Image (tube, helix red, strand yellow):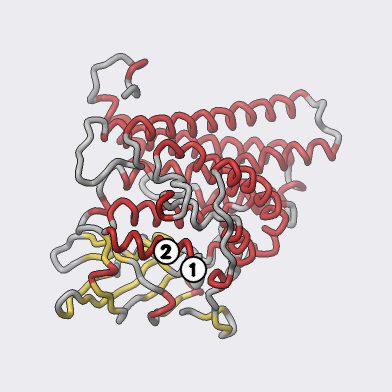
Amino acid sequence: MPDLPGGIPITAELLTIPLAPKLAIADLLRSAGQLADGFATQAAAIDQPGAFPVEEFEQLARAGFLTAPLRPDLGGCGLGIDASTTHDLLRLLKQIGRGNLAIGRVYEGHVNALQLIQTFGTAAQIERYGREAREEQKLFGVWNAEDAEGLNLLPIGPNRYRLQGAKTFCSGGGYVERPFVNGKLPDGSWQMCIVPMDEVQTRCDRDWWQPMGMRATASYKIDFSGVELGTEALIGEPGDYLRQPWLTAGVVRFAAVQLGGAEALFDFTRQYLQGEGRTEHPYQQERLGQMAIALESGNLWLRGAADRLAAYDPQFGGTPQMSHPHLGQLVAYANMMRTAIEQICIDTMQLCQRSVGTRGLLSPHPMERVIRDLTLYLRQPAFDVALAGVGAYALAQTIPADRLWQA
């Protein structure tokens, strides 16, 4: 397990947290709003490289958030894996993002990981990792980014592999205990695997993470060279991580977190103008009106994406064993939603900056931090590919525009 700066060992903070009673999704949504208010209050204190929202994740664990993405038979609420709950999940992620985008980023990775396990894992793996999330409150994540060096899975014997290489942008490095660390097999195919971070030795490059924003995500570069895994740690078949619609449909989750950051900026902008007595100025009214319209558009996109996922299949993304006639439509819609919310966030930041001027953008005002965090978070990969994919899907259709996105 990596150490904190100064050589202080990181302990498994979440292991000692008592389990929360089983909650309904409505309870989680209420709790998310309340927790987000506290997260916002504490955000400035952890806005630095090397920091991580440990206390905040303890609160999430106590409230049942780490267990919620598990199916009910595993002790969770089915949040997100049951497609009918997608809108609730997106609203919850938005609330957490409103409080602190760094927390939203790491929690979204936890949800993503549990969805992948429940979709592609064996019955034994689903039971094992479900128990670790439920009873031990393990924090999961997905560390897929890498530089040119990459990460390789090298066979070293029957049912045994050795990792060689590193991953970058490992959000929650030192705290995420069960990350997906996906790598290349000798034949070039991509294999998902989960590394038990509390049972192996890795090398963590903290100096690599010197960002302008999202500092508290602790998104380090981690070298896994020498780590050995058995086949029980491999999830799914080679290439499953890249399968659609799971790879792309999941963008709706991080888009929801980003929208929460835009809503935080709206609230801060309004509070600033009210405090300055500038609410009667017509240009300020116009800008706040534009921001309100943009945010409501974002919320409609959340609903639209959730409705299409629910109509697509009862389980998020369906089941790997079955093909689906509307796969291309769902992927295009998810990319369209992700693109629209990115522009909504950009417009909201610009309107905020025009409204408050320089004084409101100086630290320690929270607007300055949220703008830095959101600017970095919006730079998710493959934006141009996503937008072009929407156009390619539309160009391939012959049905009228008003039926283009109907299942």
Label 2, residues with CA under 10 Å away: few <14, some 14-19, many ≥20: some
Is 266 left, or right, of 26 in this rendering?
right
Is 247 left, or right, of 190 in this rendering?
right
Q: Residue at x 60, y 67 (%)?
A: 54
Q: Which mark is residue 136?
A: 1
Q: Which mark is residue 155?
A: none
Label 1, residues with CA under 10 Å away: few <14, some 14-19, many ≥20: many
Q: Say if 3 sits above or below 267 in the image.
A: below
Quarter placement of the C terminus: top left
Residue 135 visible: yes
Q: Residue at x 34, y 76 (%)?
A: 224
Q: Are marks 2 and 1 in contact (CB under 8 Å)?
A: yes
Determine which quarter of the picture holds residue 268.
top right
Q: Amino acid at mark 1?
A: Glu
First reached walking from the N terminus: tag 2 or tag 1: 2
Q: Amino acid at mark 2?
A: Arg
Q: Say if 384 sits above or below 40 in the image.
A: above
Q: CA distance from mark 2 to mark 1?
A: 7 Å
| Disc 2, SS | helix
- Front-lying residue, 178 or 203: 178
Residue 219 visible: no
Q: Residue at x 58, y 83 (%)?
A: 8
Name the residue carrying label 2: 131
What x and y, as percent, mark residue 318?
29, 41
What x and y, as percent, mark residue 329?
30, 30
Residue farthest along the bottom direction in this orientation: 7
